[in-house]
């Protein structure tokens, strides 16, 4: 029997204080556990596949700082490299050779990228790539998909997923209608809806942006032919195709979703893993498009901390580790064992569930499914997920505190970790 006792006294005290200091007590909404109930645990430290909270409880972690901890938290090689760089300074606000190194690694890995610009977050990368799409095409409108999240910039907070879905917010107060009037939306995996939008807006659409595998409405893979169809539609209409690979980049394959599915977009956004746990983002694509970006071209975008030496160092070392033979095979093996195991246990304990995985990214919905888009995902039993989440937490398993978020493994996770997780899941689902 796995212990269900969970002392969170210190976490509760710290969170109570935090609520007087920060909106909702957090620096990012989903951390507040509003969609799953109860109080969030306050982290003290992380290492490998594990978390320790301020009360001393240990957990197996399947959030991984929302994706970047693909090598495991605080990997010794990354920490060692960071220490060496730290001695030279934390920020230059000027060019450093480390930017060249990471840029070359990204360009070599990602099929669509011939030139890259580093920024400080996935949100910043998506903001910049939207401006670039418009600058290059001379068109203002853009298509995004319902439930896909591309950061919290005004123009993307239209039928967004992630924390917006988790909190049940339709969009956001403070976003003018004029800002989102050029943002068109379609259901994910629906090519006919995309074709209709192009027909209704001839020569007005700059491009289509999407998560090639959705992670911000839960884990939703593309249907067969969907990405190929988008590539064809955009080319036929003189529009750009943009893959937001902030989550999938270097995770579902070393070259991202575009390598995995063999579809090359015009532009790509990256983040998370290429910072190795430090704040970073990037956007890149074909040389002729990227040459529009200042100072090479007229489209302005800048950032004092962009390409800072610590983030570059962590990214370089992380990508080096990912190039080791067998890394992605191992990630796929343990994640498949976890995802298949969760579905089998749900079936055996009488729960409607569906889900799956690609490499080190996975998801579980409490609905019979199948889930092809955000509307399907919203049919999930959110109360059941909340009870499941709490039960797993009490048994030392840390899952994303939202039905509408993908989960992540790392190559620090062991077969024993997966076995413990599945044993805990059987206990919890048996009692739901």
Image (tube, grey):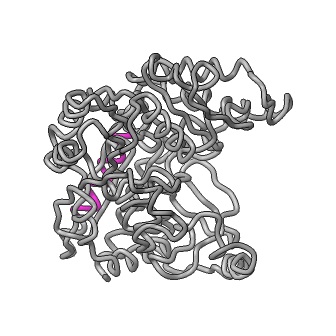
Q: Nearer the viewer, residue 91 or 199?
A: 199
Tell me, yes or no, whether the highlighted magenta stretch contains residue 13: no
Dominant SS type (magenta):
helix
Quarter of the picture holding the C terminus: bottom left
Q: Is residue 120 above or below residue 312?
A: below
Left or right of 58 in this view: 429: left
Image point (39%, 30%), residue name: 137
Residue 392 x %, y %: 44, 71
Query: Is 363 drawn above or below residue 272 in the view shown?
Result: below
- Which is more toward the observer, 303 or 323? 303
Horizontal and vertical percent position of residue 381: 28, 76
Give the answer, above or below, for where 283 lies relative to 102. below
Q: Nearer the viewer, residue 329 or 360?
A: 360
Query: Which quadrant is the N terminus positioned in?
Result: bottom left
Q: Quadrant of residue 402?
A: bottom left
Query: In the image, which residues are magenta?
Result: 331-344
Residue beneath the point at 60% across and 47% down: 73
The image quadrant of residue 340 is: bottom left
In the image: residue 284, left or right of residue 348: right
Q: Picture coordinates of residue 297 (x, y %)?
A: 57, 21
- The tally of labels here is 0
- Viewed as shown, does residue 199 lie left or right of 392? left
Give the vertical position of 210 relative to 315 (above or below): below
Residue at 40% over, 48% down: 415
């Amino acid at each position: 029997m796995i212990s269900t006792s969970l002392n969170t006294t210190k976490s509760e005290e710290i969170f109570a204080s935090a609520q007087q200091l920060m909106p909702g007590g957090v620096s990012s909404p989903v951390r507040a556990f509003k969609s799953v109930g109860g109080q969030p645990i306050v982290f003290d430290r992380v290492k490998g596949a594990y978390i320790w909270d301020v009360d001393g409880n240990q957990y197996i972690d399947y959030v991984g700082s929302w994706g970047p901890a693909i090598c495991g938290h605080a990997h010794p090689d990354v920490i060692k490299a960071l220490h060496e760089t730290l001695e030279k300074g934390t920020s230059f606000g000027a060019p450093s050779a480390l930017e060249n190194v990471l840029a070359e690694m990204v360009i070599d890995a990602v099929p669509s990228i011939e030139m890259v610009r580093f920024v400080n977050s996935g949100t910043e990368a998506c903001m910049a790539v939207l401006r670039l799409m418009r600058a290059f095409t001379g068109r203002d409108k853009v298509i995004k998909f319902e439930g896909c999240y591309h950061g919290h910039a005004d123009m993307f907070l239209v039928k967004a997923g992630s924390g917006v879905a988790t909190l049940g917010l339709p969009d956001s107060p403070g976003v003018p209608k004029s800002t989102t009037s050029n943002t068109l939306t379609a259901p994910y995996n629906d090519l006919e809806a995309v074709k209709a939008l192009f027909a209704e807006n001839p020569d007005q659409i700059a491009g289509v942006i999407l998560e090639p595998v959705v992670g911000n409405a839960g884990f939703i893979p593309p249907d067969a032919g969907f990405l190929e169809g988008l590539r064809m539609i955009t080319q036929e209409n003189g529009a750009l195709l943009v893959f937001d690979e902030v989550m999938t980049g270097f995770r579902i394959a070393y070259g991202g979703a575009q390598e995995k599915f063999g579809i090359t977009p015009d532009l790509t956004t990256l983040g998370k893993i290429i910072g190795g746990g430090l704040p970073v983002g990037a956007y890149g694509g074909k040389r002729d498009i990227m040459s529009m970006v200042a100072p090479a071209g007229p489209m302005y975008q800048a950032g004092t901390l962009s390409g800072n030496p610590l983030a570059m160092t962590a990214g370089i070392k992380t990508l080096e580790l990912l190039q080791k033979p067998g890394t992605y095979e191992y990630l796929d093996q343990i994640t498949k064992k976890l995802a298949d195991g969760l579905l089998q246990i749900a079936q055996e304990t009488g729960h409607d569930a569906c889900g799956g995985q690609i490499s080190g990214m996975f998801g579980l919905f409490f609905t019979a499914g199948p889930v092809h888009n955000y509307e399907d995902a919203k049919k999930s039993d959110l109360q059941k997920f909340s009870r499941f989440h709490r039960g797993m937490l009490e048994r030392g398993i840390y899952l994303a505190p939202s039905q509408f978020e993908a989960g992540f493994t790392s190559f620090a996770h062991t077969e024993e970790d997966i076995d413990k997780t599945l044993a805990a899941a059987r206990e919890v689902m048996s009692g739901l």
